[in-house]
Structure formats: structure tokens, C-alpha cells
Image (tube, grey):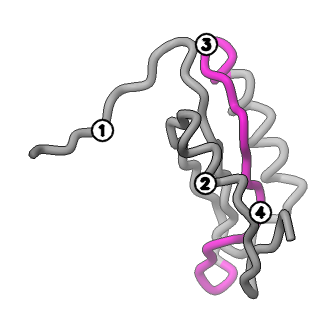
């Protein structure tokens, strides 16, 4: 069975991940996120979960990455499940 990424469509629910490479301050990440929200709204995409911060870094490197993940009810259930790791904690 072949697996392929499906393109985003208006009405899709998504997770938006704005990640600092290490040297970009959180305040700048929120500026980028605000613009990302505008673009997603124009495309009819609904951000239902987000991560904004220095999650995957590279020795204080400048810049950021943006990752968008299409979500359905099952994926949302998994994202909302309790997490207790050194880097992430919620729902505990």
C-alpha cells in the first residue's frame, strides 16, 4: 500500500508548529505565528492545536521552521493525551 501526503483543503483542521532553531526569541516566533494564522485563515484552514517555541534546536542557530499537520478526530485525541516527558508535560 502506498502512502501519500494529501494536500490541504479549505475546512481542514491543522496543528501548527513554529519551532525556533535556538537563537530566535519567543517574541519573534509569535510574530511569525500571527502571520501564519492570517495565511491559514485566508486558505480556510483551522488551527486547532499549536506549538510555538524552541522544541528542536541547533546550537543557537537563527531562524525557525514551520510544520503543519492535518488533524482528524483520532489525531486530536492522541495530541490531547497526557504527556510527561522531560521536554513536554500536559494533561497530567
Residue 50 image offset from top left, x and y in percent: 73, 46
Please report whichever mark, 1 or 3, sits nearer to the chain's N-terminal start.
1
**Whole-number angstrom distance, CA of label 4 to CA of label 2:** 21 Å
Which label lies toward us, 4 or 1?
1
Residue 11 image offset from top left, x and y in percent: 57, 14
The residue under label 4 is 53
The residue under label 3 is 44
**Whole-number angstrom distance, CA of label 1 to CA of label 2:** 19 Å
In the rendered structure, find residue 45 and report the number of the disc placed on it: none
In the rendered structure, find residue 5 and report the number of the disc placed on it: 1
Please report whichever mark, 3 or 4, sits nearer to the chain's N-terminal start.
3
Which label lies toward us, 3 or 2?
2
Please report whichever mark, 4 or 1, sits nearer to the chain's N-terminal start.
1
Stretch of the chain drawn in magenta:
39-60
Residue drawn 64% across and 61% down?
63
The residue under label 2 is 78
Q: Nearer the viewer, residue 61 or 47?
A: 47
User: Mark 4: which secondary structure?
Assistant: strand
Left or right, residue 90 beside residue 77:
right
Please report whichever mark, 3 or 2, sits nearer to the chain's N-terminal start.
3
Quarter of the figure with the C terminus: bottom right
Amino acid at each position: 500500500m502506498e502512502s501519500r501526503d494529501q494536500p490541504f483543503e479549505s475546512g481542514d483542521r491543522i496543528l501548527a508548529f513554529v519551532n525556533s532553531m535556538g537563537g530566535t526569541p519567543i517574541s519573534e516566533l509569535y510574530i511569525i505565528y500571527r502571520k501564519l494564522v492570517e495565511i491559514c485563515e485566508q486558505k480556510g484552514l483551522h488551527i486547532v492545536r499549536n506549538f510555538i517555541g524552541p522544541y528542536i534546536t541547533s546550537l543557537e542557530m537563527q531562524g525557525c521552521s514551520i510544520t503543519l499537520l492535518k488533524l482528524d478526530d483520532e489525531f486530536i485525541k492522541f495530541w490531547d493525551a497526557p504527556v510527561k516527558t522531560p521536554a513536554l508535560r500536559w494533561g497530567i
